[in-house]
Image (cartoon, helix red, strand yellow):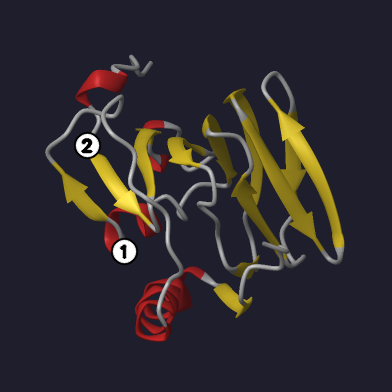
Amino acid sequence: MTQLAPQDAAVYNHVDMLCRILLDGRDTDGAFALVEERAAVGAMTPRHVHSRESETLMVLEGALEAWSEGRSTEVEAGSLIYLPPGRAHAFRVVSAAARYYNLITPSGFESFFRDSGVLLTQEFAGELPIPGPVPPEGIARLQAVLDPLGCTITGPPPFDS
């Protein structure tokens, strides 16, 4: 049994999204990981493909736009979207701010947030970073962390401004 204490979880700035790992694979015998994220409008991921993990985004507040293999859909508070492994996908915040869970199945990929994010001393409910594009050298650093995880950045975010 694992007791969840979100206020005790470390907070990271990961590509201008605040995140904290609520359940690590060590807590679930590798079955899954649960990451909570908050971000301001415009925060987004590059297009990428996971070789083994699925991501299920459960929107608690605000709205996201999810893209997968040429199709986009808006995911509002109270809704979720499943992004299977082996398919290119990306997402971005389209409301003023959003808060959502990222359920990663199986676990392992949660290490990406720790290994490529910046550990913060602020509370998770604190001020949101102002999103901006990830520079080319930043993409190279992200890909270096992603390589051992079997995840590949396949291009820039697929969204119209």
Q: Residue at x 42, y 50 (%)?
A: 110
Horizontal arrangement in the rendering, residue 97 relative to residue 49 (left or right): left
The amino acid type, in three-letter code, at marker 1 is Ser
Q: Nearer the viewer, residue 45 or 104?
A: 45
Tag shown at residue 116 = 1
Classed neighbour count for the residue bearing mark 1: other residues with Cα under 10 Å, few (<14), some (14–19), many (≥20):
some
Q: Quadrant of residue 46?
A: bottom right
Residue drawn 48% across and 68% down? 149
For the residue carrying disc 2, how many other residues have a C-alpha within 10 Å: few (<14), some (14-19), or many (20+)? some
Mark 2, residue position: 10
Relative horizontal placement of residue 12, taking residue 57 as reference (left or right): left
Amino acid type indicated by mark 2: Ala
- What residue appears at the point 21 percent right and 28 percent down from the top-left corner? 123
SS for dot 1: helix
User: In this picture, is 5 found above or below 26?
Assistant: above
- Marks 1 and 2 sit apart, C-alpha to C-alpha, by 14 Å
Would residue 86 be found to the left or right of residue 16 on screen? right
